[in-house]
Amino acid sequence: MSVNVIDGRQLAERLVEEMAEEVKARTGRGYQQPGLAVVLVGEDPASAIYVRNKIRTAEKAGLHSVVTHLNASCSQQALDKVVTELNERDDIDGILVQLPLPAHLSEERIINLVTPEKDVDGFHPMNVGQLATGQAHLVPCTPLGCLEILKREVGDLSGKHAVVVGRSNIVGKPMASLLLQANCTVTVVHSKTMDAANLCKQADILVVAVGVPELVDSAWVKPGAVVLDVGINAIEKDGKRKLMGDVDFADVADICKAITPVPGGIGPMTIACLIKNTLVAAKQRGVKQPVVKAR
Ligand SMILES: NC(=O)C1=CN([C@@H]2O[C@H](COP(=O)(O)OP(=O)(O)OC[C@H]3O[C@@H](n4cnc5c(N)ncnc54)[C@H](OP(=O)(O)O)[C@@H]3O)[C@@H](O)[C@H]2O)C=CC1
Ligand SMILES: Nc1nc(=O)c2c([nH]1)NC[C@@H]1CN(c3ccc(C(=O)N[C@@H](CCC(=O)O)C(=O)O)cc3)C=[N+]21
């Protein structure tokens, strides 16, 4: 079977260009330039790379951005204050607090504190509830990027058997909700699942978000399936940082219809969807530029 390697980087670039046009048109009609705020706590090098990518992409789309970098030892109170101020700022449409947070800080508290209207991660319980009840407004970026790829690759998802490996609040659970909403038959596999490989082997669509390098090989994949590899695992090899997915790409590529690579697959699409969510939030808020009165 000749495999289709899905170019997430190129697709993401195209989406960002389209959004840049839309931003330009909206500001031309008198709307405020959309603004994204990213909050980073501590010095985790991978988080620093992601935040830099997010800001660079936001700028390409014509958004303005604000990064708040707090010390790893900052207090919960100090972090709460930053988020509260961003909630109140009129020029900010989207707020993302980079996870994971240092262990002494409460992620749950922060997820609840970001105002749902600006919650471009889609992690606030109100947005989670809206997704679960089919009223989705702001949907977590990674599953949204996966759905965008599936719509292009598969077209109508109705009646397809989709298996999601992983059940995190960030990827697995919202992915399962979106696929169900798109009329797939959905199976969710996790660390307590018995016979995971055989369940996965029944999937027309296989989305893997586990965090175990190359867990999924050809024994887990039905010939002709579409495989999305969400995993980002940084491995030290010959003194260099190398990224690996959760899927054994070389082994699976021979039998599947299409597959996303790591890097260059779901990662860039996640960032494009963050920009998309910031636009959704900006449109919903609908803030106009201040009118300059003629003297
Ligand atoms: N490309 C992107 O934009 C993004 C990539 N990621 C990457 O995706 C991966 C998953 O992230 P995330 O969802 O946050 O991770 P979590 O650690 O929060 O969740 C992992 C899930 O995988 C399940 N799991 C673990 N081991 C197995 C196994 N052997 N068989 C079946 N299921 C298993 C766990 O099950 P249980 O619930 O039972 O513990 C859990 O539900 C990571 O590599 C992360 O870096 C994450 C976010 C965005
Ligand atoms: N509040 C919050 N929201 C998130 O969406 C969020 C988060 N916290 N914490 C961490 C995870 C992970 N994540 C990635 C985004 C882009 C790439 C990405 O662009 N990856 C590039 C490679 C980048 C590299 O070199 O490391 C690629 O796959 O091609 C990866 C991972 C978002 N997450």
Image (cartoon, grey):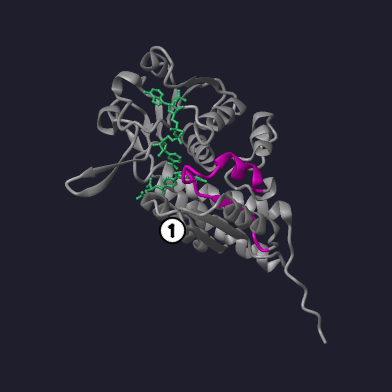
Dot 1: element: helix
Q: Residue at x 40, y 54 (%)?
A: 43
* Residue 41 screen position, x and y as percent: 48, 53
Q: Residue at x 53, y 55 (%)?
A: 39
Q: Which residues are magenta?
A: 91-114
Q: If the picture is divided into quarters, which one holds ligand 1?
A: top left
Q: Residue furthest right?
A: 295
Q: Nearer the viewer, residue 247 or 238?
A: 238
Respond yes or no on whether mark 1 lies under 8 Å from ligand 2. no
- Image quarter of the N terminus: top left
Give the quarter of the image for residue 214: top left
Give the quarter of the image for residue 218: top left
Tell me the kind of residue under disc 1: Arg
Q: Residue furthest left?
A: 238
* Residue 141 screen position, x and y as percent: 53, 43
Position of 19 with respect to 208 (left or right) is: right
Indicate whether residue 100 is drawn in magenta: yes
Q: Residue furthest bottom?
A: 295
* Residue 238 screen position, x and y as percent: 16, 46
The residue labelled by disc 1 is 52
Q: Nearer the viewer, residue 289 or 22?
A: 289
10 Å neighbourhood of mark 1: few (<14), some, or many (≥20)?
Answer: some
* Residue 242 screen position, x and y as percent: 26, 45
Q: Nearer the viewer, residue 185 or 106?
A: 106
Q: Does 261 sit above or below residue 79?
A: above
Q: Residue at x 66, y 38 (%)?
A: 127
Indicate whether residue 23 is drawn in magenta: no
Total labels: the figure holds 1
- Image quarter of the C terminus: bottom right
